[in-house]
Image (cartoon, rainbow, N blue to C red):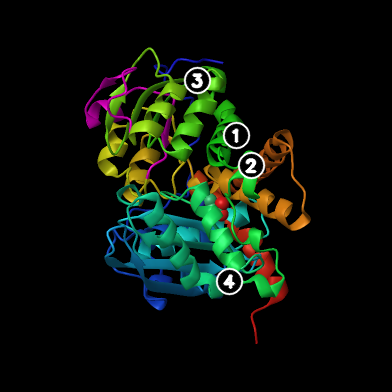
Amino acid sequence: MTTLASRPAAKQHRPKNTPPSNFSSPVFDEVGLPSDPNNLYRQTVGSMLYAAQVMNLPNGFQLILAQPKNEIMVHFPVRMDDGSYRLFKGYRVQHNNALGPFKGGLRFHPDVHLDDVKSLSFLMTMKCSLAGLPYGGGKGGIKVDPRKHSSGEMERIVRRFTTAIAHNIGPDYDIPAPDVGSSAQHMAWIADTYSFLSEATGKNANAVITGKPVESGGSLGREKATGQGVVDTLEIMLPELGLDISHITFSVLGYGNVGSWAGRILAAKGGKMTAVADHTGFLKNEKGIDTVALADHVAKTGGVRGFTGATSCTKEDFYKTKVDVFVPAALEQMVQEEEARMLNCIVVAEGANAPTTPAGERVLLERGIEVLPAILCNAGGVTVSYFEWVQNLTFHSWELDRVDRELNKHMVDAANRTKAARQKYDCDLRTAAYIAALERLRKVYELRGIFP
Ligand code: GLU
């Protein structure tokens, strides 16, 4: 196998069915989706509706999946350290529970808004279906910048938010988890608050949330799970592109939980990270960046800026760095047309949710760059969340080996079903991943029917 980033991409088959730039579906109007083509919800649901069209999914199922079941918005006051009060806004969107309880993370970020949470909750339904988990999709969040609050303030914000949504979550109904900006510590506070509020019900309250600290009902391997899943997906998909995971070069956008774990695990397998970026800056080092030292630096300083093992570069330099694999692991809509034109890679492995816009994806597909879609590539996190939930409900704890092995089985199965759909429908990988996810949902709806 060839190993150099400088060699041309393996001759790939160009799929016949890829979403056209002006894709539109009657469902957009039927369910009243926003008309702005840059709206994230319209974009994410649009990719699914294109896949639904390719596979001929009946209109009724398309309608059900094009809007979430419940959208919960709460406002709650919290006392700050200086004695003043502030009012916070929180969300929980429950997209679908045909396959099992709603499942998905909580985002703590100042830009969190309803369309964002709706999109992410929709993606969870698709991801859980593709990963073969007995879950539907949900997502929530608080409009807050956790970096601007003391630990005491965050604890009060998180506990008060939990109180506000406590009647809408539960170990067999809706199980939140971490996402951007939220941590294992936050999950521990949520579990404690929920168990205090629901003590009388006799439920296993700890199973109301996943991503908890290992000492407090969490699972071994959960912290690294999303990054591990990205690497598992690459391991399965790279050989058909003529790449050997133990010799790849790669770049990472976003060095938080997902990016830093993907980086560290890829480096441990022999890969070389030559560029990295986040909200604090862009860095480059052709000789390779120490992924572990950088993770320590980010943990201490909050960003990649100032790391001495690489030199600072421009945004353009970062995107134009020639690598085998580019891992976007930051926020949504970061790879737009401009970035897609600059990228000099063979594969984009989506560690973040919805990092590529439809216009960006068009450019990548036209340029023959393979995109491993988020619902496949970042399904590792929720899969190990599922293992944590199973361990909580059965009062067992699994060894790390078992967690990693079981995770790999789910990733291999999801990747194989995606590949099979790609072959059957001669389509791009994102469309194929949606088709594989939709096939499972279609079967369940056909068997259960729709009440009444
Ligand atoms: N927030 C993660 C995701 O987007 C994990 C969700 C979970 O573990 O439930 O997949």
Name the residue tied to disc 1: 232
Q: What residue type is labelled 1?
A: Asp
Dot 3: within a 10 Å radius of its alpha carbon, few (fewer than 14), some, or many (20 or more) residues? many
Q: Distance between the residues labelled 1 and 2?
A: 7 Å
Q: Which amino acid does label 4 sit on?
A: Leu
Query: Where does residue 427 sit, x and y in percent of width and height?
Result: 51, 47
Q: What element carries label 3?
A: loop
**Mark in front: 4 vs 3:** 4
Task: Please tell me which residue is depicted at 67% across the width and 41% down the height of the picture.
Answer: 407
> Which label sits on residue 447?
none
Upstream in the sequence, badge 4 or badge 2?
4
Q: Give the magenta range.
A: 303-330
Closer to us: 165 or 45: 165
Query: Where does residue 184 sit, x and y in percent of width and height?
Result: 52, 47
Name the residue tied to disc 2: 411
Residue 314 on the magenta span: yes
Task: Please tell me which residue is depicted at 65% across the width and 83% down the height of the picture.
Answer: 451
Q: How far apart are marks 4 and 2 (CA)?
A: 36 Å
Q: Distance between the residues labelled 3 and 2?
A: 20 Å
Q: Which amino acid does label 3 sit on?
A: Gly
Is residue 65 visible in the rendered structure shown here?
no
Proximity of marks 1 and 2: CB atoms separated by less than 8 Å: yes
Q: What element carries label 2?
A: helix
